[in-house]
Amino acid sequence: MKLAWILWLSNMLPQPAADSLCLSTTVYLEARDQTLRGQQAVAEVALRRLDSGLWGDSMCEVVTARKQFAPTIVAPGTRLQNPEAWAASINVALGAERNWALPVGQRKEIVPGASHFMAHNIASPSWRNAYQVAQIGDHTFLRVQKLKPRPS
C-alpha cells in the first residue's frame, strides 16, 4: 500500500476514521521500528499538536502540515510493506486516541508537554537544544513550545 493512496483515502473517509488513519500512518512511518512506548509517544505528540490547533483542525491536517511529520517528508510512493507493523500502528493510534479523549488529569502521558520529537540518525533541527522531555529508543522528545489546548 502506497502512502499517496492512504492520504487520498483519508480525504474520502468521514471523521473520525480519517484522523485515525492519518495517526496510524504517522506512527507507522515515524516509529514502526520503536518500542510500544516509543510509538505511543509519537502519537501523543501528534495529539497534543491537534489539541493546540496550531497545525490544523484535524489530525490529517496536523500530520500533513509542511515538514512536520513523515507523511509530508517521505516520498508519496513510499510503500507500507510491513503488515505486522501496520497492524501495531493502528492499535497504537486507536489506543492513543482513546487515552487522549479522557479528561486531562486522567490521561496517561508518556512525554508530558512534548511538542516535537526527532530521530537522531536522520534529523538535526534548529530546535534540537530545546527542553528534553524524554529519550525513547532513538527518538528524543522535546518541549520546543508550550502548547495549550485551544479554547472550547
Image (spheres, rainbow, N blue to C red):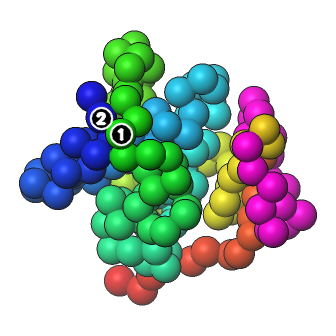
Is there any visible trace of residue 132 in the rendered image?
yes
- Tell me residue 43's x, y (percent): 50, 46
Residue 15 numbered tag: none
Q: Is residue 134 magenta?
A: yes
In the image, the segment drawn in magenta is 122-139
Residue 121, quarter of picture: top right
Q: Are marks 1 and 2 in contact (CB under 8 Å)?
A: yes
- Direction from residue 57 to residue 115 in the image, left or right: right
101 up-or-down from 129: above or below: above
Which label's residue is closer to the chain start, 1 or 2?
2
Most extreme residue toward the right is 129
Q: CA distance from mark 1 to mark 2?
A: 6 Å
Residue 25, quarter of picture: top left
Disc 1 designates what residue? 77
Give the number of the mark in front: 1 or 2: 1
73 up-or-down from 96: above or below: below
Q: Amino acid at mark 2?
A: Lys
Most extreme residue toward the top is 84
Q: Label 1: few (<14), some or many (≥20) within 10 Å?
A: few
- Tell me residue 139's x, y (percent): 73, 40
- Direction from residue 151 to residue 146 in the image, left or right: right
Q: Label 2: few (<14), some or many (≥20) within 10 Å?
A: few
Disc 2 designates what residue? 2
Residue at 19% from the left image edge and 51% from the top image edge:
8
